[in-house]
Image (cartoon, helix red, strand yellow):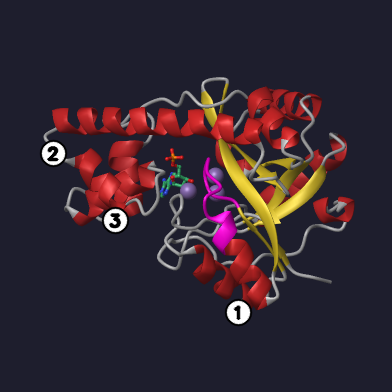
């Protein structure tokens, strides 16, 4: 059976590898089908597609859309999207607009804490047009305000910390609308990360299903074995398919390597059986 990894990042968002290097790593790690899913942007897909064709890897064009749902940020992966779709791209332009404003605001908030030049510093670390919190974390760590990227997040960039700016991302129906308009399938990314109560999780899965969502990322680089089994059961209960993705960001990131994923539980209906 082919080996799938349906969630990964390049330096077009907050990963560290180029699309070509990401594809090469996928090839070396035995991945046959790779989805490139940068945050709120698709500019890396063209290079990824060329590299994948040359390497004999099947490239699934994707994107990971930030969504505000009940005052919380949720990530929705879109797979098999048409990156030329005008509706999708118009939505992503709005997401980037918020990212730019948020970056300025994070900079102002850190300035008030005596940290100068954070916005410029973060921008200098972004390789593409997209700026994210990871770029701020890299600046903060390299300038000695934190031990490492993780420490920078927990000291400055998460809820309750001085550089935290609440999200104003797309709504869940909007994000699913963009994905589906472009011919893609929507997947709830790394669901265990949101720490939702049982009631809120039920509400999320119900709304996701009603908006035309296709699958849950049952196997994720950030899931434990128990998380995986729990979400496999929920996928069955909500009649959703199952996806798997490492959420690989680069060799420096502390998460698991590209393609190094356990198989989907037997009970799951794999998303790719619908392709
Ligand atoms: P953003 O979309 O700009 O708000 O940034 C979200 C990204 O930050 C995630 O996709 C992760 O790559 C990264 N991230 C979030 N929380 C942490 C954390 N605690 N430690 C390291 N990276 C994190
Ligand atoms: Mn990220
Ligand atoms: Mn994510
Ligand atoms: Mn991701």
Q: Position of residue 220 (x, y in %)?
A: 64, 54
Quick one: label 2, few (<14), some, or many (20+) residues within 10 Å? few
Q: Quadrant of residue 112?
A: top left
Q: Residue at x 20, y 33 (%)?
A: 110
Q: Is residue 118 left or right of residue 13?
A: left
Report which residue position mark 2 lands on. Answer: 116
Residue lying farthest top?
70
Q: Residue at x 73, y 33 (%)?
A: 181
Quick one: label 3, few (<14), some, or many (20+) residues within 10 Å? some
Tell me the number on the disc at residue 148: 3
Q: Nearer the viewer, residue 217 or 85?
A: 85
Q: Is residue 163 left or right of residue 112?
A: right
Q: Is residue 25 left or right of residue 4?
A: left
Q: Which residues are magenta?
A: 37-47
Cα distance between the residues tagged 2 and 3:
18 Å
Vertical side of 209 occupied by 17: above or below: below
Q: Secondary structure at mark 1?
A: helix
* Residue 267 visible in rendering: no
Cα distance between the residues tagged 2 and 1:
41 Å
Question: Which of marks 1 and 2 precedes in the sequence?
Answer: 1
> From the viewer's perspective, is the residue at label 1 or at label 3 nearer?
1
Vertical side of 4 occupied by 25: above or below: below
Disc 2 residue: CB within 8 Å of ligand 1: no
Q: Is residue 259 left or right of residue 266?
A: left
Q: Residue at x 86, y 36 (%)?
A: 237
């Amino acid at each position: 059976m082919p080996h799938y990894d349906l969630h990964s990042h390049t330096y077009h968002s907050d990963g560290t590898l180029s699309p070509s290097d990401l594809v090469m790593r996928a090839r070396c790690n035995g991945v046959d089908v790779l989805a490139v899913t940068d945050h709120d942007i698709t500019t890396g897909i063209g290079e990824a597609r060329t590299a994948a064709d040359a390497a004999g890897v099947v490239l699934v064009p994707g994107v990971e859309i930030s969504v505000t749902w009940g005052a919380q940020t949720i990530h929705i992966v879109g797979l098999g999207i048409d990156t030329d779709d005008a509706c999708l791209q118009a939505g992503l332009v709005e997401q980037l607009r918020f990212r730019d404003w948020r970056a300025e605001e994070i900079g102002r908030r850190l300035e008030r804490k005596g940290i100068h030049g954070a916005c410029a510093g973060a921008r200098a670390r972004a390789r593409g047009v997209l700026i994210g919190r990871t770029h701020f974390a890299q600046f903060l760590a390299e300038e000695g305000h934190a031990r490492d990227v993780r420490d920078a997040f927990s000291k400055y960039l998460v809820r309750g910390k001085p550089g935290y700016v609440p999200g104003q991302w797309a709504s869940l129906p909007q994000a699913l609308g963009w994905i589906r308009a472009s011919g893609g399938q929507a997947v709830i990314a790394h669901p265990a990360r949101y720490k939702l109560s049982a009631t809120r999780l039920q509400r999320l899965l119900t709304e996701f299903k009603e908006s035309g969502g296709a699958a849950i990322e049952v196997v994720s680089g950030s899931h434990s074995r128990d998380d995986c089994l729990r979400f496999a059961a929920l996928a069955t209960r909500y009649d959703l398919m199952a996806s798997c993705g490492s959420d690989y960001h680069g060799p420096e990131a502390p998460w698991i390597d590209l393609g190094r994923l356990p198989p989907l539980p037997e009970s799951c209906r794999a998303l790719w059986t619908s392709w």
